[in-house]
Image (cartoon, coloured by chain):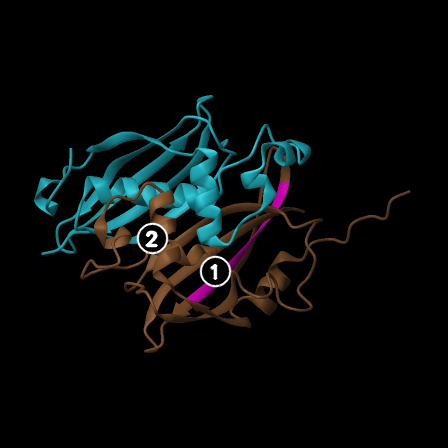
Amino acid sequence: MTVRSFEEVELGDDLPNETADVSMAQVKKFCKAAKHEFERFIDHEHARKEGFAGAIVPGIMSQGILTAMIHRWAPGATITKIDTVFRGTLLVDSEVTVSGAVTDTDDDSRVVEIDLTVVGEDGRTGVIGTALVAFPA
Amino acid sequence: MSEAAAPVDVSGARDEWVGVEFDWTTFEMDSESMIAWAEACGETDPRFTDADHPDFQAQPNFTTHCMSGRVFPKEFPQFGSGFGIDGGKTVEAHAPIRAGDRLAGVTTIADIFDKTGRSGTMIFIVQRMKFTNQNDELVSTVDWKMIKKA
């Protein structure tokens, strides 16, 4: 479900859950664009030598994935703030689920607040956060 | 026998360092990187993936990859050991970032505080980068929270 205006948003609404593409090809593409081509992100073997279970998804890529989810939910709206806490590692080439829920709405500013979560395939939470999303008048 | 760690003076460090500018770096925004970033994140909104879109701009957190020349100021106290853990990032998007923009990033220490939990006391150091474009318009503020064991 997408929302086209502030009036369509209800407190407690869930954004549609999505499975993010964190394949090695996608992470390599991100790291090249971000100039963050560190081996822990793009080389499973190297990441294991650093003590990880495999290559890990960059935290700022998780933030970008959450951003994309919000844009799909509310086309035309503007994210004015996104705050993410990196709680744990998310593995490249694993299944990662992103979700969000509306926790506040402000009629005057037409801004909604969303709680955000990224969960790994082992069920552990990798990223939590919040975003402020402004709707046009 | 190992040397005892010096006591951590978080309050003193906060008084001395919060608000002090210590790095100035410029960044060129190019459409190729902006689109590749957005596509890699699964972005489907053409505002962020189509350079021909009339409102084409970078994803709001695009500036999180712009690193200052220094992580900490010269003479900044060493808390704990090593680089620490990346605790997360907060981005405020003040205005769209367009292809061809030249951003000036100014870095400060925004906060220093500690928290004590089951695993002991952790020091939180918040590095803030403010980005203005070639028109002196503030476009983005990024807070990067680094966590170190005391």
The colour of chain A is cyan
Q: Relative to residue B31, is residue A79 depicted above or below?
A: above
Q: Main secondary structure of the magenta part?
A: strand
B81 sits left or right of A131 in the view: right
The colour of chain B is brown
Q: Relative to residue A85, is residue A89 depicted above or below?
A: above
Start-end of magenta stretch? B121-130
The residue identified by callout 1 is B66
- Quadrant for residue B94, please give it: bottom left
Magenta run includes residue B126: yes
The disc at residue B35 is: 2
B122 sits left or right of B7 in the view: left
- x, y percentage for residue A58? 49, 42
Residue at 8 percent across and 44 percent down: it is A7
Residue at 44 percent across and 22 percent down: it is A123
Amino acid tagged 2:
Ile
Residue at 42 percent across and 34 percent down: it is A22
The residue lying toward the viewer, choosing from B61 and A6, is B61
The disc at residue B43 is: none
Q: Relative to residue A126, is residue B30 depicted above or below?
A: below
- Quadrant for residue B53, please give it: bottom left
